[in-house]
Amino acid sequence: MNIQTKSLSKIYGEGEAAVTALQPCSFEISGGERVAIVGASGSGKSTLLHLLGALDTPSGGSILFDGKRLPAQEEALSRFRLSNIGFIFQEYNLLPELTALENIVLPSLLRGKKKDTPYLNRLIERLDLSDRLSHFPSQLSGGQQQRVAIVRALTNKPQLLLCDEPTGSLDTEHSRQVMELLEELQAEYGFTLIVVTHNPDIAEQFPRILTLSDGMVGGDLT
Ligand SMILES: Nc1ncnc2c1ncn2[C@@H]1O[C@H](COP(=O)(O)OP(=O)(O)O)[C@@H](O)[C@H]1O
Ligand SMILES: [Mg+2]
């Protein structure tokens, strides 16, 4: 999926309490591109990612997804998100009362579409989760939980995968595994991959790096 921002900005709060989290920025990310977003803590990385994922509304400017604006109506917006965008978060965000498998199939249930079982089975096997499907998140290691979150994010075959510090809670070895998997899956399925990280070793693996400082999208290191 191609993404184009035009003077996209975000201000939280109002008046005295207003915080400019993202200064107006305009850039384009092509379908199938791999982009890292780097910047210090508080520089606006999560804000930008949430806007790109239509999880939050901009204060100014706009985003075009494959040349189109987002639907204004909440239900249509939610359907757009479920069908096109996958999210991975630092803290995995699995639902604790659901098993790994239930977490994985949830997006297809929410979307009201039949799940693609052979596709999911391949992912589950590829991510080495076959014997963990009936486990609850609390019974899984951090690396396993993040792998469940990866399958869940890909359940509906999104064209855009957004990851907010996906290895921020993992040790070096599991971080490496997760990043390798994301790269391999991207190569295989061709989705646009955007990863927020403050780990320079991870950012270096990406052909394009967007830097954020104090809410300003700066040097586009391609
Ligand atoms: N919901 C919010 N309400 C008010 N301020 C916020 C909110 N979310 C983030 N901020 C502020 O916006 C700025 C950017 O935050 P964030 O996008 O989370 O940065 P990063 O992900 O790079 O650490 C920070 O100053 C943060 O305190
Ligand atoms: Mg953040």
Image (tube, rainbow, N blue to C red):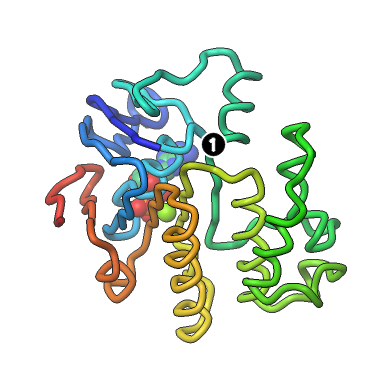
Front position in the image: 128 or 11: 128
- Name the residue that disc number 1 marks: 84
Q: Is mark 1 within 8 Å of ligand 1?
A: no
Rendered location of residue 34, percent (x, y): 33, 55
Establish if 83 lies above or below 161: above
Q: Quadrant of ligand 2?
A: bottom left
Left or right side of 10 for 53: right
Establish if 216 lies above or below 89: above
Amino acid type at mark 1: Asn
Rendered location of residue 103, percent (x, y): 76, 54
The image shows a total of numbered marks equal to: 1
Rendered residue at 41%/18% (across/down): 69
Quadrant assignment, res 26: top left
For the view shown, which residue lies furthest in the front direction? 118
Rendered residue at 34%/22% (across/down): 67
Element under disc 1: helix
Quadrant assignment, res 29: top left
Left or right side of 191 for 34: left
For the view shown, which residue lies furthest in the top direction? 73
Establish if 46 lies above or below 69: below
Quadrant assignment, res 92: bottom right
Rendered residue at 69%/78% (across/down): 141
Rendered location of residue 158, percent (x, y): 54, 43
Q: Residues within 10 Å of mark 1 (few under 14, many from 20)?
A: some
Rendered residue at 68%/64% (across/down): 122
Rendered location of residue 32, percent (x, y): 36, 48
Quadrant where the N terminus sits is: top left
Front position in the image: 178 or 197: 178
Left or right side of 183 for 72: right
Left or right side of 173 for 36: left
Quadrant where the C terminus sits is: bottom left
